Amino acid sequence: MLVESAGKAAAVNKRTADHGIMQINHKTAKYLNLSKVCVFDISCSINAAVAYLKTMQLRKNYRHCFYNIGPNGLKRGKIKACIKYEQKLNSIRIMNEYEKLY
């Protein structure tokens, strides 16, 4: 949430066209049958993201990445992008833990 939208409900990524606090793209919105209003509503967007992650429970190793590239991403050869995204998330987690210490 903080990685992609900086916690802003009205966030729009101009490069990827992802929308809202959970940065839901048009394919995911269609898959989950979401309206544009829902995508920009904080609670609706978060609930939709949780539902989407639940569909990926069997892919535990890269579930955050699957959220980012979609469930068919690895079939399209995006494993490098997946690993890079997981590393980005891990570095943010490490920084957050470091900030707690000081």
Image (cartoon, helix red, strand yellow):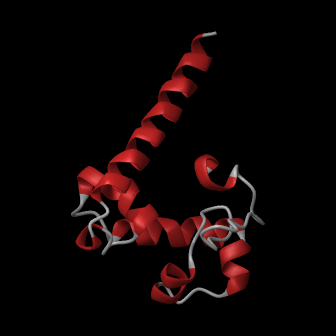
Compared to residue 76, the image places residue 64 above or below, namely above
Determine the residue positioned at 46% across, 41% down.
89
Whole-percent x, y for residue 21 in the image: 67, 61
Q: Nearer the viewer, residue 38 or 83?
A: 83
Q: Is residue 78 left or right of residue 36?
A: left
Where is residue 42 drawn, in percent x and y? 70, 65
Q: How many marks?
A: 0
Quadrant containing the C terminus is top right
**Left or right: where 62 falls relative to 4:** left
Residue 2 in the image: above or below residue 46: above
Q: Quadrant of residue 29?
A: bottom right
Q: Measuring 60% from the left and 63% from the top, which residue is drawn there?
A: 22
Q: Please name the residue shown 68% across and 65% down the image.
A: 13
Query: Residue 93: image x %, image y %?
Result: 49, 32
The spot of residue 36 in percent (x, y) is 69, 84
Looking at the image, residue 43 sits to the left or right of residue 73; the answer is right
Who's the residue at 45% across and 86% down the image?
31
